[in-house]
Amino acid sequence: MLVSHLNLRMTAAGAILALLLVAPDFARAQGKFEASYGISVARIPIGSATATAEFGDAHYVITMSGRASGMLRVLASGDGSLRTRGALTDGRPAPTEFTARTTTDDDTLDVKLVIDGGNVTELSASEPKPHPDRVELTEAHRRGIVDPLTALLVPREGDGAPNAAACQRTLPVFDGRRRFDLKLTFKRIDMVKTERGYAGPVVVCAVTFQPVAGHRSSSTMVKFLTQGRDIEMALAPVAGTRLLAPFRITIVNMLGNLVVQANRFEVVHTAPTMGQGEPSR
C-alpha cells in the first residue's frame, strides 16, 4: 500500500481489513488493534506495512503506513501514510475524515476528505499530472463512498464466525483522486496462524477491481488489476468488535505472486479510563 498503490493491494489494495465466536458488542469495546504485514513478490520481500485501529464507545481511528522497494516497481513502489476517523452505528463504521500522503517515483498525493453520510463534503487533494486519457471525476463520484482505510473493516454478518456473508458486498472506494469499486465474492474458509496474535478461521473472498473515475485508462496498475487477475483477500476477526480486517491479500502474477501477509494481528484491550486499571493484552 502505498496507497493509492497499496490501497489497491491491501484492500486489494485494494485496500488492504468478524469477531471471535463469542464477542461483546462493538459499542462496549475499548481497545486498539495492531497489525504488521510483509509484502513479497515470488517470495522475495519487497516491503512492509503497519496498521492500527483504536476503538472507542462510538468512534474509531485507523492509521496505516507502508513502504515498498523499487524492485518490480510496476507492482509496488513508494511509501505512504494514511489516517481515518469515524463513527460507529450498530457496529458499522462510517468515516467522517480521511487524510493521506503517498509518494511514488513520479508522483506525490496529499489528500484530506471530510465525509458526512458517505458523501464527501470537503475535498483537498494535490492535482494529478495532466494526461489525455484520464477518466473525468465528477461530483457524483464523491457520493456514497468509503475511504480506503474504512473499506478494510468489513462488518461481521451472521452468528459470529467468519462466513460467506462477509464477502457478499461491493466496496465503493474513493481515495481523493480515484474512485473504484472492490467487488467481493465468497471463495472458501481457511485456517491461519500468525507469529503473534490471531490463530483460527478466515473467510477468503475473491476480489474484482473495477475502476470508475479519476484513473488513467492506460495506467499499468489499472491494466494489471483488471486483466482477469486472480485476487484474493482473507479476512480475520478483530477480537472484541463486530468487524473483520485483512489478514492476507494475494494477487496472482505469472512472474510471481504478490502477497501481503500479516505476521502480527492482535488487539490490545484497554481498561476503562478514570483510573480503573492498566491496559492488558
Image (cartoon, helix red, strand yellow):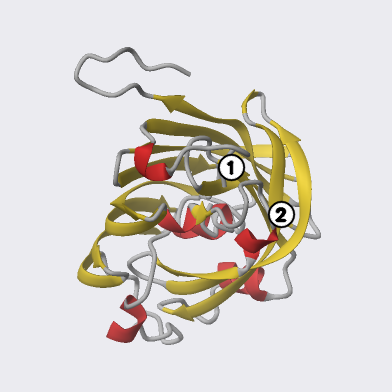
Badge 1: residue crowd in 10 Å (few <14, some 14–19, many ≥20): many
Whole-number angstrom distance, CA of label 2 to CA of label 1: 12 Å
Q: Is residue 184 left or right of residue 144?
A: right
Can see residue 109?
Answer: no
Q: Residue furthest right?
A: 254
> Residue at image x 47%, y 48%?
78
> Residue at image x 33%, y 13%?
278
Badge 2: residue crowd in 10 Å (few <14, some 14–19, many ≥20): many
Is residue 104 or residue 63 the one in the foreground? 63
Q: Is residue 104 left or right of residue 61?
A: right
Is residue 152 or residue 268 the one in the foreground? 268
Q: Position of residue 34 (x, y in %)?
A: 47, 32
Residue marked by disc 1: 237
**Dot 2: what SS?**
strand
Is residue 120 or residue 239 the one in the foreground? 239
> Residue at image x 71%, y 35%?
200
Q: Is residue 249 left or right of residue 108?
A: right
Reply above or below: 176 against 60.
Answer: below
Residue marked by disc 2: 204
Q: Quadrant of residue 176?
A: bottom left
